[in-house]
Image (cartoon, coloured by chain):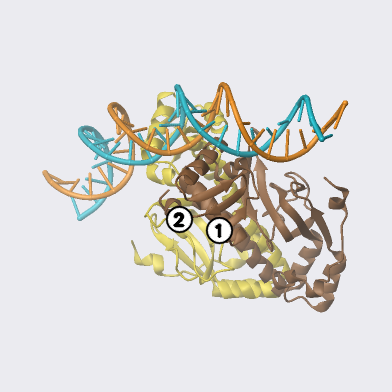
Chain colours: A brown, B yellow, C orange, D cyan
Amino acid sequence: MVAEANTPKNNCKCLSCELRNLVFTNLAEDDVRRVCESKEEFSYLKGEIIHSEGESIKYFKYLKNGLVKLFRVTPEGNEQIITITRPFEFVSNTNAFHEERYSYSLSALEDSIVCCVHIEFIKDLILRNGKFALNLISSYARTAEGIISLGLEIRKRNLAGRTAFVLLYFSNEIYHSRIFELPVSRKEIADLISMSSANVIRTFSEFRRDGIIRANGRNIEIIDINKLEVISRRG
Amino acid sequence: MVAEANTPKNNCKCLSCELRNLVFTNLAEDDVRRVCESKEEFSYLKGEIIHSEGESIKYFKYLKNGLVKLFRVTPEGNEQIITITRPFEFVSNTNAFHEERYSYSLSALEDSIVCCVHIEFIKDLILRNGKFALNLISSYARTAEGIISLGLEIRKRNLAGRTAFVLLYFSNEIYHSRIFELPVSRKEIADLISMSSANVIRTFSEFRRDGIIRANGRNIEIIDINKLEVISRRG
DNA sequence: CGCGGCTTTGATGTTCATCAAGTAAAGTGG
DNA sequence: CCACTTTACTTGATGAACATCAAAGCCGCG
């Protein structure tokens, strides 16, 4: 990995930043300027860790660019992937406000840019700006609810259903296309849907045999989306 | 069930309410009085629905007394239980602030009292009182994080591990005793851990045969908690 | 007393994890 | 640039884990 990742940049203009429309709406220009001066932008290369379980929480983090996975490692050493998400998600951990340390790790699946504001700065904004606070709670709730509902969708399906669901998830939510390059290994898909990697691979092969997808390494094309949706619903 | 359930009561003294220590800290006495006048307390008998998926969200709800389950019903008609929780949980749905309608249902597993404050009132408090907002975010995050982590704990275990985990959950988190009466049917445990009810029952029988628990209907005694913990960790 | 729902157990077949062995791909060092 | 190592992928075979079906017992309620 590369030194660049640990060198903060601060070359964005917060007043015109896309992120302003999400959480930083309703800030006075003066506050935006303060956020802008306080914030630090970090770049991460594909594969790099953004933060690890147990690290102390210093920043409120927003994904500005790229793709990340939130995960934890069980005592036995197995990864559990909690969610995979695109900008402009509020990727700071779900416990930024009630704990001192991250309970989950975050890493970059594609080169990513994370906008970081000191957590104390955010807390101060909450204290002083009610509209900001209300906005933040909404974003926060949306993110948490997405994670919870993803877990329920996975839990109710069997192997084939889960696999189909994940393919549709990437196609519909992440890439908005039926042709895409998977950002994760087969094993990571297994860690996301709580199945063994051998069986995920087997299911991919079956989908290929049945003419539902084309799969060449990480390059995926969904051919028969109807069948895939049926499998996802049935499974 | 009974008319009482739909008749709000308002006989508590909010200034001395236990709940004040949770979210309503940092309110001026005047605001507490306003909360007190605005709030409504609803009682629910065991088995009653507190609210259903799709209903519009009018109240911010706090569980003051009792025990509740948060759940949803899949299109196929199966229940998925998201969490089972005691006071003083912030049981209002995780989407109270970013959606108009509940995405999950809530019902009483024991006779329960829910303290309800109009959501607009809460939003107004967030706007006007930064400390309240910060406190609320903390509670909110804690609740959401509990649900997410429960899901991960369940997903990483097999049938026996999940069953042991749930028994320990009731013993440690809900009843603080090794002898307790289950608040749910075998089928509801199955709906919580995403397994079939027949297999949950079978696992109970095995635990009984192996001298790990005594189980007479819903009356449970954990005899060998060490073994149960090993099964929960291993499984 | 009878009915319906929850519980229990057994039998059966499906689904899934695991192990093993082989292939392809990608990084590493000479 | 090639040989080497490692990591990801793939497939088959096997047994364990789990769902499902069915039948019977139990209990509470009308």
SS for dot 2: helix
Examine the rendering and report whether any part of residue B89 can be seen. Answer: no
Q: Nearer the viewer, mark 2 or mark 1?
A: 1
Local crowd at mark 1 within 10 Å, few (<14), some, or many (≥20)? some
Nearer-the-camera pick, B88 or B16: B88
**Quadrant in which residue A177 is drawn:** bottom right
Q: Is residue B8 visible?
A: yes
Q: Place residue D30 in its image quadrant.
A: bottom left
Gap in angstroms between the C-alphas marked 2 and 1: 13 Å
Residue D14 point in image, percent of width and height: 45, 22
Q: Residue at x 56, y 60 (%)?
A: A172
Hey, what amino acid is under mark 2? Glu
Mark seen at residue B6: none
Taking the image as shown, residue A210 lies to the left or right of residue C3, namely right
Q: Chain of mark 2?
A: A
**Residue A82 % position (x, y):** 61, 49
Say whether residue B192 is left or right of residue A129.
left
Say which residue appears at 77% left-offset and 75% top-offset. Answer: A27
Q: Is residue A103 above or below residue A144?
A: above
Q: Secondary structure at mark 1?
A: loop
Which residue is label 1 attached to?
A178
